[in-house]
Amino acid sequence: CILEIDLGKIRVTSGEVEIESYFEALQYLDEPAISVRGIVQALDRAATDRRVKGIIVHIPAESARKTGFDFATVQELRDAIIRFRSHGKIAVAWAESFPEGGRGNLDYLLACSCQLVFLQPSGSLSLSGFNIEVSFYRELLDRLKILPQFGGREEYKSAMNSYTEKRFTREQRENLNSLLQSWYEQLTGGISESRNISVAQLKSIIDKPPMFAADALDAGLVDALLYRDGVYNAVRKLAKEGPACVVPH
């Protein structure tokens, strides 16, 4: 059989799902939830189940999902899918679109953990850098004649800076730039390894505007342009003939 993880129909939680009231029980009937750990455990069990030939991972745009993803969640799911594949199983990801504004970065990184990535013909693919926004309230507090007083350990502990400073300190800027660079390297390194695209080529793609589906196919970022029914037909064929069977676009 082929399993499907439809991330548009479930709410993925960081911790275990606990139902403490009647109202929460009703909510979960309408909005099923599963923890990251639950998905990982299910994939690990499926990897050794002879009945399971592969999985389809549907990654809808963030606006159509119950929850967004952070880096830690994507890394956990990527590792689980890669382990699943190591048992000779098929893993296929598909999306209607990988949206712009940075929202498609982690979605696409997750998709790349699969052997094949399918994109809807009417969709687009956008990869970009990362940014961090920080608000500073010191001027407002000064106008209200409020003097903020916080205790802090060393200059890189910047949690209170939004209230005590009017702009980035050198140490806070250095800290956040280091974090952004780490995210960027994890994104480009992960995609580069999975899609067999050089980091230099990938960075060039990131610097360009969002791609139409056909352009993403030409750039080697996706393997075929298919709607949902085409994805299901392709996976059925792959399960019989193996991943070497390439779906024409």
Image (cartoon, helix red, strand yellow):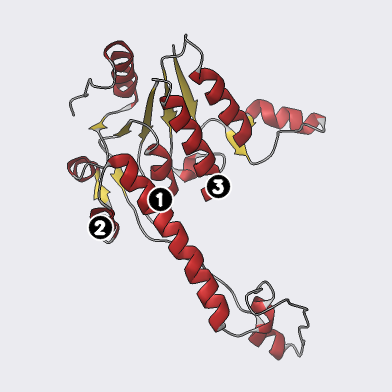
Q: Provide the residue designation for mark 3.
A: 72
Q: Provide the residue designation for mark 2.
A: 200
- Which residue is at a point 35% across and 46% down the rendered structure image? 191
In which quarter of the view is residue 203 placed?
A: bottom left
| Residue 128 to residue 44: above or below | below
Of discs 2 and 3, which sits in the foreground? 2
- The reply to whether discs 2 and 3 touch (Cβ–Cβ < 8 Å) is no
Count residues near mark 3 (Cα–Cα under 10 Å), then give few for <14, some for 14-19, many for 20+.
few
Which amino acid is tagged 2?
Ala
Residue nearer the viewer, 160 or 63: 160
Residue 234 appearing in the image? yes
SS category of the residue bearing label 3: helix
Q: Provide the residue designation for mark 1.
A: 105
In which quarter of the view is residue 228 placed?
A: top left
- Which residue is at a point 37% across and 51% down the rendered structure image? 189
Which amino acid is tagged 3?
Ala
Between the C-alphas of marks 2 and 1, the distance is: 17 Å
